[in-house]
Image (cartoon, grey):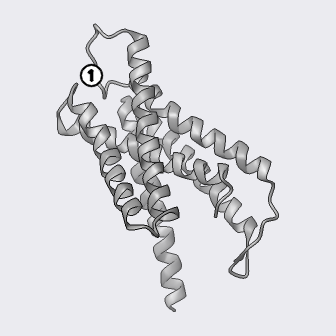
Amino acid sequence: MSDTIFKIKQIASLIIFVAVLSLMGMITQQPVMVIAYAVFFLVVVAVMFFLMTKRQRHFELSKESSPLFHRILGGILMLLAIAIPVYITLHSTIINLPSSLGMGKIIGGTLGATIAFIALILGAVYLINTRGSELVKRIIGYVLFVLGAALPGILMSRFDSTTTGIGSVYYVAMAVLILAYNGFGLLLNRD
């Protein structure tokens, strides 16, 4: 009975997770994009589920899948994690940047902020999970995590300090984080 309840909780959590992430489609001010985002995140979840079920047998992990396929998929996820903020910045009205900024500054700033965010969070996860046996490295990891978590809000508050603007940036940051974390794990071929 508890196994059935556990499965129901997993499925409900997955549905809520995809529904919340698909709300990022409202950023583009086109209702059809909510469906497009939902389909995109369902495909990502399905691919990740497929990869995990191919590896898992009787609660043990096997190493039979192709490392090249994992690296390619990981690279694609990392590229998507970097490209999504640029796409949203250029094709939505959520981020109200001054018109005096040129296209190059907007793209460069968004790319720089995204890469810094990914580096801070993945560096924190690495220090906490991999090098976490030493207290100093764990503390540095948590400090990096707090800095990474604050970065999107701090940068957005310079241009739009409304709740909607900052909240929407965190939706984008959550999508970037999920894609980057899974892509990084596939690139390193870690379980």
Left/right of residue 83 with respect to residue 50 in the rendered view: left
Query: Total number of numbered labels?
Result: 1
Q: Nearer the viewer, residue 143 or 133?
A: 133
State the residue at coordinates (44%, 32%). 85
Please tell me how crowded label 1 is: few (under 14), some (14-19), or many (20+) other residues with Cα within 10 Å. Answer: few
Above/below status of 84 relative to 8: above
Asked whether residue 168 appears in the rendered view, the answer is no
Which quadrant is home to the C terminus?
bottom right
Secondary element at tag 1: loop
Which residue is at the far left? 162
Which residue is at the far bottom? 1
* Rendered location of residue 118, percent (x, y): 46, 42
State the residue at coordinates (46%, 75%). 9
Above/below status of 9 relative to 40: below
Q: Nearer the viewer, residue 165 or 180?
A: 180
Above/below status of 86 relative to 99: below
The residue that label 1 is drawn on is 96
* Rendered location of residue 35, percent (x, y): 49, 42
Asked whether residue 74 appears in the rendered view, the answer is yes
* Rendered location of residue 18, percent (x, y): 47, 54
* Rendered location of residue 32, percent (x, y): 46, 35
State the residue at coordinates (46%, 42%). 119
State the residue at coordinates (27%, 42%). 167
Amino acid bearing label 1:
Asn
